[in-house]
């Protein structure tokens, strides 16, 4: 018998889950504003390809550190890496104040940015899975993820206003203040790992390449490529249209992602994550295409709604599949591999889509992104032999 929403929320929001929710909210509030960071790069003289290279810098270091972090948070515990990642991420915003031109210094800061976010993303979502009841893992991760979506609805609007009025130096200080609040809250989260399993890194990689995980990881990669198209390139694209604010898209995006998670709170757990992946990924395809079909403020809102509806369930559903097929006792490692594959899409997608913009047009990248996400739907349906409940 399904739980009522009131009971579902009260069961999830324990002391540690509540603190984790808030800590992740402030962390994500410092991450989302960087969708306007490409405007800073353009002002420094970057073309679309160079913009993609600098965007990929953060993904590069994030990917490099993930396998180590994934193994260590299972072996040494989550809390220590939550604090290490928080300190690195906090320091990054202040380092952005130093380089004032495109070059090795700014790229080094992007690498540091990715290092901090890579550690924190893996650890936050592993803790979110730890603190969710095993029989409601998908809905637990989905509700936890609302903290990240909710923050985007507010912080991007504030960030755009800060840049308009005071410029990017105050933007970086704003993000640093939010990161500090997240770090302070993280200090009060208790360790969830009592028994530290002996699971060599080589075995983790061997299991990661097992047939049962290939299609979920491929779908995750293609999903990430689709998201990269608007996270990195929507702000420059809207500037070519003469549209002043990208926040309309992201406000609609985050509100629709939150709404679909609240309405379908226990749907994934009752019917299986694959039951929601097909319509969710299809909604994302439509939303990406609407960015170019409706090149207006109204179009940004409509496309944001459809992209948000898709993202709202794709991320928790795919992560749940990866955890269940990888093994519950090694959640940290497999959640980290899942976020690694997600970042790999951003790493490769940012420069490649930038090249496509430079060689063809912005229209081309959104057509390509929609096609790649659609390929994920096809792969999941025809080539994933596992049950629809996993």
Image (cartoon, rainbow, N blue to C red):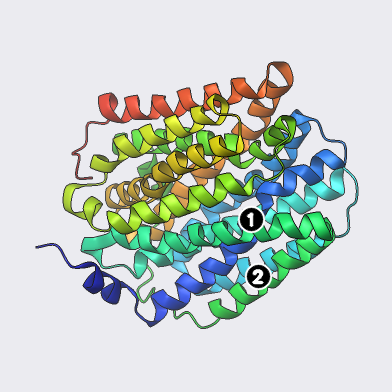
Location of residue 138 with respect to 223 vertically, above or below: below
Q: Residues within 10 Å of mark 2 (few under 14, many from 20)?
A: many
The alpha-carbon separation of the residues under discs 1 and 2 comes to 13 Å
Looking at the image, how many numbered discs can be counted on the residues? 2
Location of residue 315 with respect to 191 vertically, above or below: above
Numbered mark located on residue 215 in the image: none
- Res 308 → quadrant: top left
Q: Which residue is mark 1?
A: 156
The foreground one among 37 and 90 is: 37
Local SS, label 1? helix
The foreground one among 26 and 137 is: 26
Q: Is residue 213 visible?
A: no
Furthest residue in direction top, as rendered: 360
Q: Position of residue 9 (x, y in %)?
A: 29, 71
Local SS, label 2? helix
* Disc with the residue nearer the chain's start (1 vs 2): 1
The foreground one among 86 and 255 is: 255
Q: Which residue is mark 2?
A: 178
Task: Tell me what residue is drawn at x 41 percent, y 79 percent.
Answer: 16
Q: Is residue 217 visible?
A: yes
């Amino acid at each position: 018998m399904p739980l009522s929403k009131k009971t579902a929320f009260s069961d999830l929001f324990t002391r540690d889950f509540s603190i984790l929710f808030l800590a992740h909210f402030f962390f994500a509030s410092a991450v989302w504003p960087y969708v306007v960071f490409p405007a800073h790069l353009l002002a420094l003289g970057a073309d679309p390809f160079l913009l993609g290279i600098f965007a990929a810098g953060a993904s590069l270091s994030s990917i490099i550190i993930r396998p180590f972090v994934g193994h260590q948070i299972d072996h040494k515990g989550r809390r220590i890496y939550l604090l290490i990642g928080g300190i690195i991420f906090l320091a990054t915003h202040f380092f952005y104040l130093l380089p004032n031109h495109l070059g090795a210094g700014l790229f080094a800061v992007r690498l540091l940015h990715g290092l901090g976010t890579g550690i924190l993303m893996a650890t936050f979502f592993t803790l979110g899975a730890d603190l969710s009841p095993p029989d409601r893992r998908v809905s637990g991760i989905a509700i936890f993820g609302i903290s990240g979506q909710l923050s985007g609805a507010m912080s991007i609007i504030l960030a755009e206003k800060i840049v308009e009025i005071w410029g990017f130096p105050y933007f970086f200080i704003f993000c640093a203040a939010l990161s500090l609040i997240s770090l302070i809250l993280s200090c009060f989260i208790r360790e969830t790992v009592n028994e530290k399993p002996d699971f060599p890194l080589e075995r983790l990689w061997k299991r990661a390449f097992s047939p049962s995980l290939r299609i979920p990881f491929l779908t995750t990669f293609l999903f990430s490529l689709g998201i990269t198209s608007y996270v990195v390139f929507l702000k420059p694209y809207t500037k070519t249209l003469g549209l002043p604010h990208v926040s309309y898209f992201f406000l609609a995006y985050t509100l629709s992602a939150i709404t679909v998670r609240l309405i379908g709170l226990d749907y994934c757990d009752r019917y299986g994550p694959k039951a929601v992946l097909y319509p969710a990924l299809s909604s994302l395809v439509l939303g990406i295409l609407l960015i170019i079909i409706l090149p207006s403020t109204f179009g940004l809102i409509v496309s944001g709604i459809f992209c948000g509806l898709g993202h709202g369930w794709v991320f928790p559903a795919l992560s749940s599949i990866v955890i269940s097929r990888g093994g519950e006792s090694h959640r940290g490692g497999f959640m980290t591999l899942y976020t690694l594959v997600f970042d790999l899409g951003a790493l490769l997608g940012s420069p490649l889509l930038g090249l496509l913009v430079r060689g063809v047009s912005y229209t081309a990248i959104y057509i390509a992104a929609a096609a790649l996400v659609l390929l994920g739907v096809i792969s999941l349906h025809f080539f994933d032999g596992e049950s629809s409940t996993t």
